[in-house]
Image (cartoon, grey):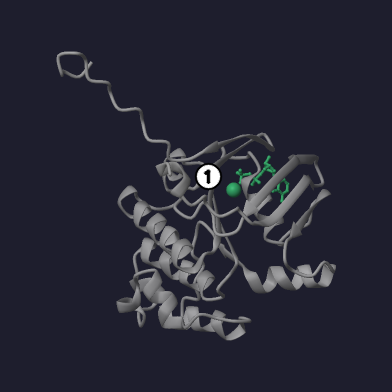
């Protein structure tokens, strides 16, 4: 038997969400803005996707549509394995989608634990509050008020608050956009850990190409259109040693 035949094939990817022909026109008094121009996108269960695009390319608009905060002008979004009815889909969005934004928007008068616990209280099947805080590495600061936390600690609380709902889909809009380099990585690590531990389908929108390093898949948005798909994290080709053993 060859070695190849003993290798187990990877499990088939299960589609979690399909978007077809998503178009969005933002109508304002002055003008109409065509923000998305017919997006076709499948999200697979449990994957970590990074959506890269320059400012104004339509990232936030797309996340808002995927998360049910806004409705498309045309096209449709189907969540697989949930009921087909529109009411069920709306309920789905409320109960099973978590959002993380660029600024953490915590309740200033509440401790980190209280901020998370209040979301848990309304959730359909919450994680334990302390477990969510532990997942983001903030268990020791749980009794701190937001003003005593650093910006990246506050962002971790915001992530815990999204995770405590045990969302099936976590949508992060520029989650590291206001953080310094040293703390940016920590926040991305937390998002990666949450995705591995909870199996949450996670989509991170960013203008920062470097964020793509943590992704299973990178997708690119430009002028409201998705560019062809790429696999992320392809290691650079190592230099080939020359015949005398020196690096070419
Ligand atoms: P990104 O998140 O990539 O910066 P956005 O989705 O915020 O992109 O914006 C895409 C385009 O839609 C931009 O031209 C922006 O000015 C416009 N836009 C976004 N939201 C609105 C809105 N509420 N009203 C009018 N135009 C909007
Ligand atoms: Mg945006």
In this view, the residue in front, 179 or 216, is 216
Quadrant field for ligand 1: top right
Q: Residue 182's spot in the image, x, y percent? A: 30, 51
Quarter of the figure that contains the N terminus: top left
* Location of residue 136 with respect to 209 vertically, above or below: below
Quarter of the figure that contains the C terminus: top left
User: At 41% across and 82% down in the image, what residue appears?
Assistant: 130
Q: Residue 141's spot in the image, x, y percent? A: 32, 77
User: At 82% across and 46% down in the image, what residue appears?
Assistant: 29
Q: Is residue 239 left or right of residue 195?
A: left
Residue 169 is drawn in which quadrant?
bottom right
Q: Residue 35's spot in the image, x, y percent? A: 72, 41
| Identity of the residue furthest to the top in this view | 243
| Identity of the residue furthest to the front in this view | 1
User: At 77% across and 68% down in the image, what residue appears?
Assistant: 89
Q: What is the secondary structure assignment of the residue under circle 1?
A: strand
Does ligand 1 reach within 8 Å of label 1's beta carbon?
no
The residue under label 1 is 217
Q: Residue 246's spot in the image, x, y percent? A: 16, 18
In this view, the residue in front, 42 or 105, is 42
Asked if residue 145 can be seen in this view, the reply is: yes
């Amino acid at each position: 038997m060859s070695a190849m035949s003993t290798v187990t094939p990877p499990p088939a990817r299960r589609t979690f969400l399909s978007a077809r022909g998503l178009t969005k026109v933002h109508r304002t008094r002055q003008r109409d803005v065509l923000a998305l121009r017919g997006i076709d996108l499948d999200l697979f269960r449990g994957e970590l996707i990074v959506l890269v695009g320059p400012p104004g390319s339509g990232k936030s608009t797309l996340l808002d549509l995927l998360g049910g905060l806004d409705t498309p002008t045309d096209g449709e979004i189907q969540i697989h394995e949930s009921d087909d009815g529109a009411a069920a889909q709306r309920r789905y969005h409320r109960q099973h989608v978590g959002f993380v934004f660029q600024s953490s928007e915590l309740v200033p008068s509440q401790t980190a634990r209280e901020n998370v616990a209040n979301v848990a209280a309304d959730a359909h099947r919450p994680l334990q509050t302390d477990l969510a805080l532990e997942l983001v590495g903030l268990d020791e600061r749980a009794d701190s008020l937001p003003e005593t936390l650093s910006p990246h600690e506050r962002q971790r609380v915001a992530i815990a608050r999204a995770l405590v709902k045990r969302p099936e889909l976590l949508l992060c809009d520029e989650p590291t956009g206001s953080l310094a380099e040293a703390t940016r990585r920590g926040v991305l690590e937390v998002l990666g850990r949450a995705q591995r531990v909870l199996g949450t389908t996670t989509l991170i929108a960013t203008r920062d190409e470097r964020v793509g390093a943590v992704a299973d898949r990178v997708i690119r948005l430009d002028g409201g259109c998705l560019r062809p798909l790429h696999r992320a994290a392809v290691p650079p080709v190592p230099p080939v040693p020359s015949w005398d053993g020196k690096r070419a």
